Image (cartoon, coloured by chain):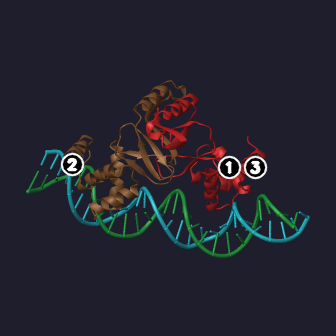
Chain colours: A red, B brown, C cyan, D green
Amino acid sequence: MIDDKKITDMFREKGLRVTPQRLVTYRTLWDLRHPSAEEVIEEVRNRIPAITVATVYNTLECLVEAGLVAKVFSPDNKMYFDADTHPHQHLHDSTNHRIIDVYDEDLHTIIIEHLKKNKQLHNYTVQEVKLHLVGYQNQI
Amino acid sequence: MIDDKKITDMFREKGLRVTPQRLVTYRTLWDLRHPSAEEVIEEVRNRIPAITVATVYNTLECLVEAGLVAKVFSPDNKMYFDADTHPHQHLHDSTNHRIIDVYDEDLHTIIIEHLKKNKQLHNYTVQEVKLHLVGYQNQI
DNA sequence: TTTGTAAATTAGAATTATTCTAATATATTT
DNA sequence: AAATATATTAGAATAATTCTAATTTACAAA
């Protein structure tokens, strides 16, 4: 339910030019949850038939660059994206072959705090902490 | 410093046939730490020039399947592997474009214990917990 | 409001990593 | 030592992503 005005402001704040292609791509990311680049292209094409794959890839790249979208780590060789940049975790559900959001704010804090004590990391600035679970759905 | 005898036993235990190609591929994985499939192919080729890419990909796949090698989640669209299957974390060092092992056994345990309390996960069996940090090296 | 310009988009070719296919060779079992 | 299921090979095919050069557009400044 985010409106174009809001998205426009977000883009401007990051110094990004606002184009119809970018607005639609960003909105599509929100609608699809954890889409692959391919899935984004397919859906964006439904909304702007004339758009090219290059534009979608460029847009995704620049949104990631600006910190407005996160690249999701994954075990296959495709690019996945997530417009939700709030701290959360991902569960790779191998039963249904999909990525599920897990919101566990405490866990995020616990990890961050624990990492501060880790000597191995003292020479590094950690920008992102990504927790991925791999699992399957139990029978009912 | 793992010898062929040991690797052979590991393979047999998992019901894998033991071939020279597989022995060399596994050993190469140990030597290279967190190689991409491509890097494995390159180094394996130095050791067995006649080996084909298909064999290396097949071997990597079957080692992962057997649980002897882990697929590393990553943000680019390449496959990375890790012969160390002990619980540990990965730091993606964007300064030097490499993956660094972080060993923090406490953290692993803390995460596992914390996840047990998470209601969202009660319908799932979590097989793997992968923690990836993204960061850069501090100036000295 | 128009204009200049840097940046974005387009079309389509090129590249790159990975997977597939069918024939041949080999590890293991008997 | 022979039988056979499985692994390997060579090379083609596929699929995802990136590149190139021409065109268009968003935005800043007049």
Query: Could you say which disc has been placed on residue A133 in the image?
Result: none
Tell me the mark number nearer the camera, choosing from 1 and 3. Answer: 3
Query: Could you say which disc has been placed on residue B4 in the image?
Result: 2
| Circle 1 chain | A
Name the residue tied to disc 3. A8
Name the residue tied to disc 1. A26
Distance between mark 3 and mark 2 Cα atoms: 60 Å
Mark earlier in primary sequence (1, 3): 3
Measuring from the top left, give residue C15's x and y in whole percent. Answer: 49, 68
A14 or B52, which is in the foreground?
Answer: A14
Query: On the picture, is B66 further left or further right than B112?
Result: left
A131 or A49, which is in the foreground?
Answer: A131
Q: Residue furthest front?
A: B140
**Location of residue B13 (image quadrant):** top left
- Disc 1 + disc 2, Cβ < 8 Å: no
The amino acid type found where label 3 is placed reads Thr
